[in-house]
Image: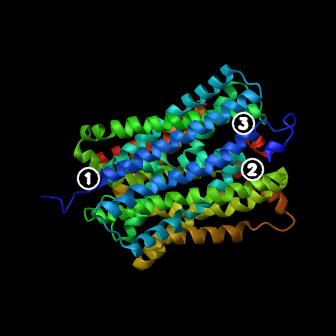
């Protein structure tokens, strides 16, 4: 009976989105296996022992567990907004919870609404998801185009000095652009309401605190949890003040 | 090319490079197709419809604010990752928070000297391992237990998550950028002043200016920064080196040497 007006919950957990999400995970796994086999055969050529190969593989995996849990914690905050399959797709691939949330809000803003607004309909949501996917392709397209070009640059014997000069030319402008973008976006949220301002400041404070504590205790792993922790604490504060 | 090379003088990484420069782009394109397939299938078979012009406007809005990251990140990470790992890193992301720490940990675990093929292989193994952990984590915590966790969490908490997720992300993310660029305080102050002027000065004037706020933030900060920091021709070398080091500082790793030796 509700077939014509499916709810947003039905839209975001649509089986077709699950197919895409599972395909994404399978492709990441396949890529890793291809690279793993190539790395193992290269290891034999340079005389690395099997123990060394296993140790390196295990160490890499263990150090990735913390950041992976942090990413999934952040993902839980996105689940009600994006649904399970799209959360897997968006966070499984290049991008971040912060990036995706901001991009989603920008896309919905174009359609005259915003994340969590009651007037978002299924078509808007699908438009947003497609816009996010195209946005995520941005990094991949640049990587596919630039990697062979930069590889050739390396082959032509780029010296450290010229490489540094070149990267310096790229470095200032994008840093300025990024800071400009995020200070403006942040202040926009800050100015929206006093509750939002408190949430914003709390989140920034937790991030600063965890970064300092991580440095002080020399525990870089704390930094991997910092964004997830900052989000959770800030949202909790928002919950209690509203 | 590598087949005609004398095996005794050949780079031991030649086969690895060949495999990754073939399969890297193929798997990355496949990942991109899979990523686009979900929403596209909803439009094609799911009964949803989208306005092409609205979609274009959404993508333009995202690109205007975020597009600079798409270009800058691949260029900045290339010297550290080397060509092969680029296709892994920019498929799955989490580069500075997951992949690079994993790579360095692995290199330390086998005491591989930086710049050696061993270091490069250790990093490759670690990134594969990290990628598999990434897949397992998402499958279990988000895919399997995610919805259960959502049913356990009360509705008003979910409401708070929905309401506050944007400021909660932005507060931490702005702070992260401030910390990451703390060696460029002039840029941070410039961006802060531009943000205040745009949000409290320009945005209230008209809705058009309010919508263009992020773009104004980018353009004004970039222009002011360029005018302020434009190095004198003679001082260029010193200035560039300093800012290059500031920019690369967080990414500095033994792998940078490995990439250079390719």
Image vertical order of residue B135 relative to residue B107, above or below: below
Q: Name the quarter where the N terminus of chain A is drawn.
A: bottom left
In percent of width and height, residue B218 lies at 57, 67
The label shown at residue A212 is none
Report if residue A103 is visible in the image. Answer: no
In the shown orientation, is residue B122 left or right of residue B66?
right
| Residue on which the image places disc 3 | B120
In the shown orientation, is residue A227 left or right of residue A108?
right
Nearer the observer: mark 1 or 2; the answer is: 1
Helix, strand or loop status at disc 2? helix
Label 1 to label 2, Cα distance in Å?
Answer: 47 Å
Report if residue A57 is visible in the image. Answer: yes
Label 2 neighbourhood size at 10 Å, few (<14), some (14-19), many (20+)? Answer: some
| Residue on which the image places disc 1 | A9
Q: Residue at x 43, y 78 (%)?
A: B208
Seen as rendered, the residue at the extreme top is A51
Seen as rendered, the residue at the extreme left is A1
């Amino acid at each position: 009976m509700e077939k014509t007006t499916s709810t947003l919950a039905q839209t975001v957990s649509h089986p077709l989105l699950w197919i895409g999400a599972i395909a994404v995970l399978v492709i990441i796994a396949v890529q890793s296996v291809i690279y793993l086999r190539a790395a193992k055969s290269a290891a034999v050529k340079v005389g690395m022992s099997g123990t060394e190969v296993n140790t390196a593989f295990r160490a890499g995996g263990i150090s990735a567990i913390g950041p992976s849990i942090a990413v999934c914690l952040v993902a839980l905050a996105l689940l009600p907004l994006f649904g399970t399959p799209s959360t897997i797709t968006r966070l499984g691939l290049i991008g971040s919870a912060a990036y995706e949330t901001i991009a989603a809000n920008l896309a919905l803003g174009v359609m005259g609404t915003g994340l969590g607004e009651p007037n978002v309909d299924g078509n808007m949501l699908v438009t947003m998801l497609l816009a996010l996917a195209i946005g995520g392709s941005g990094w991949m397209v640049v990587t596919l185009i630039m990697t062979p070009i930069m590889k050739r640059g390396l082959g032509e014997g780029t010296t450290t000095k010229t490489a540094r000069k070149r990267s310096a030319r790229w470095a200032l402008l994008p840093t300025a652009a990024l800071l400009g973008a995020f200070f403006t976006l942040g202040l926009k949220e800050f100015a929206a309401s006093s509750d939002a301002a408190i949430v914003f400041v709390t989140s920034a404070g937790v991030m600063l605190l965890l970064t300092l504590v991580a440095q002080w205790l020399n525990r870089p792993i704390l930094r991997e949890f910092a964004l997830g922790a900052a989000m959770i604490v800030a949202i909790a504060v928002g919950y209690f003040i509203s | 090319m590598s087949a005609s090379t004398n095996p005794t003088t050949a780079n031991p990484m030649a086969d690895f490079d060949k495999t990754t420069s073939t399969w890297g782009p193929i798997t990355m394109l496949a990942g991109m197709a899979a990523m686009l397939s979900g929403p596209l299938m909803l439009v094609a078979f799911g009964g949803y419809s989208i306005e092409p012009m609205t979609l274009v406007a959404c993508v333009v809005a995202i690109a205007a604010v975020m597009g600079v990251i798409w270009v800058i990140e691949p260029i900045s990470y290339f010297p550290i990752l080397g060509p092969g790992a680029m296709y892994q890193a920019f498929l799955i992301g989490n580069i500075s928070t997951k992949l690079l720490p994993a790579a360095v940990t692995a290199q330390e675990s086998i005491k591989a000297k930086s710049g050696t093929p061993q270091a490069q292989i250790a990093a490759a193994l670690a990134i594969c391992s990290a990628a598999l952990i990434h897949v397992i984590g998402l499958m279990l915590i988000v895919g399997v237990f995610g919805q259960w966790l959502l049913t356990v969490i009360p509705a008003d908490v979910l409401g708070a998550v929905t309401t506050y997720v944007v400021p909660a992300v932005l507060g931490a993310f702005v702070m992260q950028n401030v910390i990451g660029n703390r060696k460029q305080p002039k840029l941070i102050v410039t961006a802060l002043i531009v943000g205040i002027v745009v949000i409290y000065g320009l945005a209230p004037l008209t809705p058009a200016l309010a919508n263009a706020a992020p773009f104004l933030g980018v353009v004004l900060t970039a222009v002011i920064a360029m005018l302020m920091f434009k190095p004198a021709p003679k001082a260029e070398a010193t200035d560039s080196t300093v800012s290059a080091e500031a920019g690369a500082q967080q990414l500095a790793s033994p792998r940078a040497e490995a990439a250079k030796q390719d």
